[in-house]
Amino acid sequence: MKIAINTGLALLLGAQMTLAEPMHGISMYGEPDLPPDYVSLPYVNPDAPKGGTIVFGDKGGFDSLNPYILKGRAPWGVRAHVVESLMGRSYDEPFALYGVLAETIETGPNREWVEFTLRKEAKFSDGSPVTVEDVLWSFETMGTKGHPRYQRSWAKVEKAEQTGPQSVRFTFNVEDFEAALIMGLRPIVRKADWDGRAFEESSLDVLTGSGPYVIDEFEPNRFISFKRNPDYWGNDLAFNKGRHNADVLRYEFFTDNDVLFEAFKSGTTSWTREGNAGKWETRYNFPAVTSGDVVKSEIGHKRPSGSKGFVFNTRKEKFSDWRVRDALIAAFNFEFINTATNGGTEPRATSYFSNSVLGHDEGPATGAVLALLEPFKDTLVPGTIEGYSLPVTDGGERNRKNLRHAKNQLEAAGWTVKDGTLVNAAGEPFEFDVLLKNGGTIGGIQTEGIVTIYIDALKRLGIKANIKSVDDAQYKERRNAYDFDMIYNFYYLSLSPGNEQKFYWGSKGVTEPGTRNYMGMNSPAAEAMIDKMLSAPDAESYRSAVKALDRILTAGRYMIPLWYSKTSRLAHKKEMKFPARLPMYGDWSGFLPDVWWIEN
């Protein structure tokens, strides 16, 4: 890896202009939707008033203000409100970026390099300019000492160099069409903040960001407040028009979800997101709702469902056989549990990309998807090519048919019942733990309650399962180290899956701590599909690769999937408003407070 600083390269810059043209934005395929002279993002209210306070209620706490390392727990708001990147996402397009700190972006003919030109007016909150040196330092430091998600993308950079007074170029050592966009989304921090301190060590030192907010007051594990910077350099950017409207964003932390909800009912917090369809209809009848002081809003979306559920750790011998995982999925009586805990109104996520054009088609693989999978057919789990569907029950409590199937699968895998206990050939009992957070919920439903119903069903197969509840810190530590048998997780997936998929499913995560490959899957076929996604020459080829990956994940039986919702349910104070025109991602990351405003 080489990093070079050079400000006297006028001849080189002139030569580059014949190869590429600086652009105001970039899209994964084709051109971005918005023209160079766009005045605002299409889903904002450009005339939204400024002012007011939004109070968030959050569960858990924080003990660090550095969200870019593996150590510590940092509040989400630091990344969202304080620190900026070179480019920013439009949530009305599958994957399009527009300039923020960077005025322009240009790439090589095959995206073998990307170059950004910084805006001269870009400044940190202390008034110091955002420089190329800050950019290069941020990339290298996070790429070598930061969280593994940054290290993976940095490994694809062959050379990082300054190519002009305001310009920086990254040259890649792999074919990856998404790499240029990933570079645009990397956070840029102020190098001087780390003079005399180690970046990789967790601390409560305040970051000096270039974003619209600054950290105001905080008390670890209790609250943190962000104040809108009146001197924010980017106030007049078209990309920011109608955004960042509240004067103060305050996060209050609670240890219990019930207490958090009571805080909202009492007016202590400004809004809440309800993940339980049944509770949305039954528990929002308190005085503030009936009087109209609290409004219930449903936000539709067109994004993938993702997959939330209980993940098998296949690093454990007992879960390494797909037939065992198939049996344990069959034993999970989804229809009964969904009705008992969630009102039964939400659909099950039948794939990792349900509710989108990226989800695999039912039945056998055909066409381009089949062609991608064929070379790996001897290594794929049954059902990947032929088609796999989750088991369905009649909704009754007994689940006899699926339990019979589970028993047969377990016997085929070498497990039999003796004296009421399921044992292997060595006489070892089938027993495992489900690791949960203390008081953890899934869409407002106590996770422990769902697992308890499941454990009762497993007893009928001779399996002993135990609930192990730990605090947030222990949970994160054990999850990062893959120190569990089964764990609950929600894989959020977008309409533009790319490099992060190797962070989720890549073989390095089998042993490398801190990835999201919690299931420990080691699939050359899956990694090949991700490589195909990243090098796809057009949108059709890209979609085929994602559909093939979806088949590998779904048929692999790596987790017991739960439900998803086609809408988000937000209850909020009546003064809080959002635009009538919603982005295709709906209530996605940052939607609230990003484009909301206070109307008194």
Image (tube, helix red, strand yellow):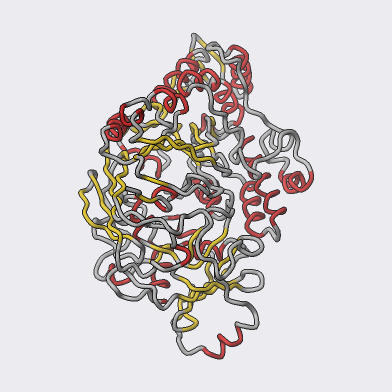
Instruction: Look at 57% across and 29% down and name the residue there.
Output: 348
Q: Is residue 154 visible?
A: no
Closest to the observer: 10 or 534? Answer: 10
Q: Is residue 225 above or below residue 426?
A: below
Q: Is residue 120 left or right of residue 194?
A: right
Quadrant in the rendering for residue 280: top left
Instruction: Look at 50% across and 65% down and name the residue there.
Output: 184
How many tags in the picture?
0
| Residue reaching furthest to the top | 419
Q: Is residue 75 above or below residue 489?
A: below
Residue 591 percent coordinates (x, y): 44, 49
Closest to the observer: 325 or 576? Answer: 576
| Residue reaching furthest to the right | 367
Q: Is residue 538 visible?
A: yes
Residue 179 percent coordinates (x, y): 56, 63
Residue 30 percent coordinates (x, y): 66, 63
Q: Is residue 258 left or right of residue 10?
A: left
Instruction: Look at 39% across and 31% down and name the residue there.
Output: 441
Instruction: Look at 25% across and 66% down and name the residue there.
Output: 197
Q: Is residue 118 above or below residue 270?
A: below
